[in-house]
């Protein structure tokens, strides 16, 4: 791997190596730029470092404490953000549906929420590229949305028990289903400069780290590509301060490594630390916030889950967890709310399931032991519903300091009326599906999934933090790319869209650079 | 457990689970002995084990974590930091025990202890501690941590017929009613369904 000294003026420092940082890191390095990525965590070797054990794998979660408030506090830690090279793609489920075109113009369609300053067409070439590059396994043709220019490179992964049950339940009530698109390989896959990645072994532990390299987390895809093209990956380096010159441009990034402060000089910064750490860093530095929008409009998908016990042996720890999808409810005909949701089947690991019985069901003692003895007969179904931006939901800095000596973020979240109605709709539909499939003793868990918003992209610096190209309205050499820039949540899991934005941000940056060089 | 020494389990997974199976003598480093004993008994009630049948001493793991000062990445904004929460919560449990039964929690019979814990869970527990510390949230946090520790233990996972730790070869039979040879026959739960 190439390396640069702190005093060498590099073209770009990228903060964070997840779905937002890794693709653009590779793109910038490929264009010949000198780039350094700062990653707070380690570069794991999945084969020797990842045990098939949930407790051991909590090392993949961002475990610096966050304070969670509002009427419906959001769980962090295992629920979303990651640490280590690859960020939260280390523990994402690999579910990679594309957003639908209408999702980008929610305000135009419903008069609520927010339009994106870009459209599906702007991202479509990147979706095509990503699906081929990552080796996404999915159905072709895809049953919902506009026709695709490219087919998925690999057929769908095999269906596990929960997926078969959802197929059965939906079939009985006329809801269309399909094997889902997942960023895990259904066959061996080769990419230049990365090599072969082997097919998924159905180990079922995607959310605790893939030990085989079948899941397209960034550490086995864009990161090796970036290193091949000459990027430096600086791990266990925690960015804290962005130094500015008199004109307001960033001149260097201060980070902590081995308990010491260091500073990397740079021409540009790409901030890709996720929807909590990105605004936290901006607020700590009093940076890029003339709009007052940094930290505002924190959103989380309505991720209601329903667990049921079945006659059949399900053994829900096997296979890709989210095997099946239905997008029939992305715009339900009988909706009394704006937008909609997707439905997925879910497998589960034992501790995650036990923890939900405890937190959501308040179940303990002999009853909990009994419920857990039925674990092999348990299957889940889950929704991802749009969450509207709202004034009451935001992130701020608290007075409490964490072990790094930095203010802990406080995130306030309250489920709005639209989300409430959507969740009720989803719960009714999913309970019906699970009942038809043969599920008994159903238990609902009101999960809030993914962290979205807090540095929204928009067409005006009065109401947004970054422009449609991903550049800060206030700081000319600062770019932001992660789930914080989403103006609305979309009703799909965010990873694929973050990666598409990442490639696009890099391409537009390189174009701009080319143009200014030509002047 | 039967799978643990075999080639069906990777070295990295085996190492983690074997370490967890080791029962060493433990001296609390965060809690004082009295609180530690109280927490051990509270956790026994939560996971339906007793001193004679105790498989996992959950309090050991909580004590270790609080001593290490690590957490799970978040806490409720209206709750104190984890160390303070545990100290206050145990104080509250003992206060409620005295108000209800005029004894310390560990001196009560199992049913009485469960009554106290139920009162904390639903927020009806008496005592001044609970005016400061939201009892339902304390119970939720305690129960969640105890649950995650307990069901991570290989012996408890065995009881569930769970075989996910056999990670070396992957799975081919993943559909409904498709058991692989190395997976234990399920304890069929039919009656309650």
Image: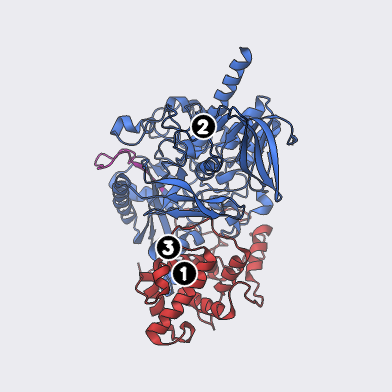
Chain colours: A blue, B red
Q: Quadrant of residue A147?
A: top left
Task: Confirm whether residue A88 shows in the render.
Answer: yes
Q: Which residue is mark 2?
A: A500
Tell me the quarter of the image containing the N terminus of chain A. Answer: top right
The answer to which image quadrant residue A261 occupies is top right
On screen, residue A419 above or below B179: above
Residue A189 magenta-highlighted: no
CB under 8 Å between callouts 3 and 2?
A: no
Residue A185 x %, y %: 56, 41
Q: Quick one: quadrant of the C terminus of chain A?
A: top right
Secondary structure state at the residue bearing disc 2:
helix
What predominant SS class does the magenta segment belong to?
loop
Q: Mark 3 and mark 2: span between their CA atoms?
A: 35 Å
Residue beneath the point at 36% across and 54% down: A71
Question: Looking at the picture, does residue A117 appear above or below residue A219?
Answer: above
Alpha carbon distance from label 1 to label 2: 46 Å
* Span highlighted in magenta in the image: A328-344
Look at mark 1 in the image and give the residue it sits on: B187
For disc 2, the chain is A
| Frontmost residue, A165 versus B49 | B49
**What percent of the width, then of the height, locates residue A310?**
38, 60
Numbered circle sitting on residue A359: 3
Chain bearing mark 3: A
Q: Nearer the viewer, mark 3 or mark 1?
A: 3
Is residue A363 shown to the viewer in this render? no
Chain letter behind tag 1: B
Q: Nearer the viewer, residue B87 or A389?
A: B87
User: SS for tag 1?
Assistant: loop
Side (left or right) of B87 relative to A331: right
Closer to the eye: label 1 or 2: 2
């Amino acid at each position: 791997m190439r390396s640069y000294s702190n005093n060498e003026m590099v073209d770009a420092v990228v903060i964070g190596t997840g779905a937002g940082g890794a693709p653009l890191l590779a793109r910038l390095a490929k264009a010949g730029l000198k780039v350094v990525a700062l990653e707070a965590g380690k570069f794991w070797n999945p084969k020797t470092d990842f045990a098939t054990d949930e407790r051991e794998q909590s090392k993949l979660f961002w475990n610096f404490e966050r304070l969670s408030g509002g009427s419906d506090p959001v769980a962090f830690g295992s629920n979303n953000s990651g640490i280590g090279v690859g960020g939260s793609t280390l523990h994402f489920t690999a579910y990679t549906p594309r957003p639908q075109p209408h999702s980008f113009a929610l305000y135009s369609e419903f008069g609520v929420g927010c339009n994106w300053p870009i459209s599906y067409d702007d991202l479509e070439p990147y979706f095509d590229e990503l699906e081929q590059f990552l080796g996404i396994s999915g159905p072709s043709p895809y049953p919902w949305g506009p026709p695709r220019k490219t087919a998925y490179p690999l057929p769908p992964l095999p269906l596990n028990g929960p997926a078969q049950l959802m197929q059965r339940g939906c079939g009985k009530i006329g809801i269309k289903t399909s094997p889902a698109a997942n960023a895990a390989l259904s066959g061996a896959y080769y990419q230049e400069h990365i090599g072969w990645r082997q097919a998924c072994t159905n180990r079922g532990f995607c959310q605790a780290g893939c030990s085989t390299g079948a899941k397209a987390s960034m550490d086995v895809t864009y990161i090796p590509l970036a290193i091949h093209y000459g990027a430096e990956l600086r791990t266990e380096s925690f960015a804290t301060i962005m130094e500015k010159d008199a004109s307001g441009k960033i001149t260097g990034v201060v980070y902590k490594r081995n308990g010491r402060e260091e500073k990397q000089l740079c021409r540009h910064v790409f901030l890709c630390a996720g929807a909590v750490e990105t605004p936290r860093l901006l607020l700590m530095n009093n940076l890029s916030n003339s709009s007052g929008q940094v930290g505002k409009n924190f959103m989380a998908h309505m991720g209601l889950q329903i667990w049921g016990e079945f006659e059949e042996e399900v053994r829900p720890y096997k296979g890709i967890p989210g095997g099946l999808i239905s997008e029939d409810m992305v715009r339900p005909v009988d909706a009394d709310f704006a937008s909609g949701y997707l439905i997925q089947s879910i497998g589960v690991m034992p501790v995650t399931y036990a923890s939900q019985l405890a937190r959501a069901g308040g179940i303990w003692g002999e009853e909990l032991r009994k419920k857990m003895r039925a674990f092999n007969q348990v299957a889940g179904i889950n929704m991802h519903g749009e969450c509207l931006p709202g004034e009451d939901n935001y992130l701020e800095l608290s007075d409490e300091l964490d072990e790094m000596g930095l203010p802990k973020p406080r995130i306030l979240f309250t489920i709005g009326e639209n989300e409430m109605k959507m969740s009720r709709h989803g719960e009714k539909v999913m309970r019906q599906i699970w009942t038809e499939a043969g599920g008994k003793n159903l238990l609902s868990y009101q999960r809030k999934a993914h962290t979205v918003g807090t540095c929204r992209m928009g067409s005006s610096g009065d109401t947004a933090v970054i422009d449609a190209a991903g550049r800060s309205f206030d700081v000319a050499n600062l770019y932001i790319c992660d789930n914080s820039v989403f103006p609305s949540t979309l009703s799909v899991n965010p990873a694929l869209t973050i990666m598409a934005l990442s490639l696009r941000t890099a391409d537009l940056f390189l174009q701009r650079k080319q143009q200014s060089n030509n002047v | 457990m039967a799978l643990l020494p075999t080639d069906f389990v990777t070295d990295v997974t085996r190492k983690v689970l074997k370490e967890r199976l080791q029962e060493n003598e433990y001296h609390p480093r965060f809690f004082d002995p009295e609180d530690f004993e109280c927490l051990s008994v509270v956790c026994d009630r939560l996971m339906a084990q007793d001193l004679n049948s105790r498989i996992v001493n959950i309090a050991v793991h909580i004590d270790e974590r609080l001593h290490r000062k690590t957490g799970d990445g978040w806490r409720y904004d209206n709750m104190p930091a984890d160390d303070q929460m545990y100290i206050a919560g145990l104080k509250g449990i003992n206060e409620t025990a005295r108000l209800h039964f005029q004894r310390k929690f560990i001196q009560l019979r199992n049913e009485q202890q469960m009554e106290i814990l139920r009162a904390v869970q639903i927020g009806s527990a008496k005592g001044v501690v609970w005016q400061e510390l939201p009892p339902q949230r304390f119970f939720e946090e305690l129960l969640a941590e105890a649950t995650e520790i307990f069901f991570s233990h290989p012996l408890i996972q065995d009881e569930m017929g769970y075989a996910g730790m056999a990670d070396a070869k992957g799975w081919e039979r993943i559909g409904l009613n498709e058991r692989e040879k190395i997976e234990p026959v399920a304890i069929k739960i039919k009656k309650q369904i």
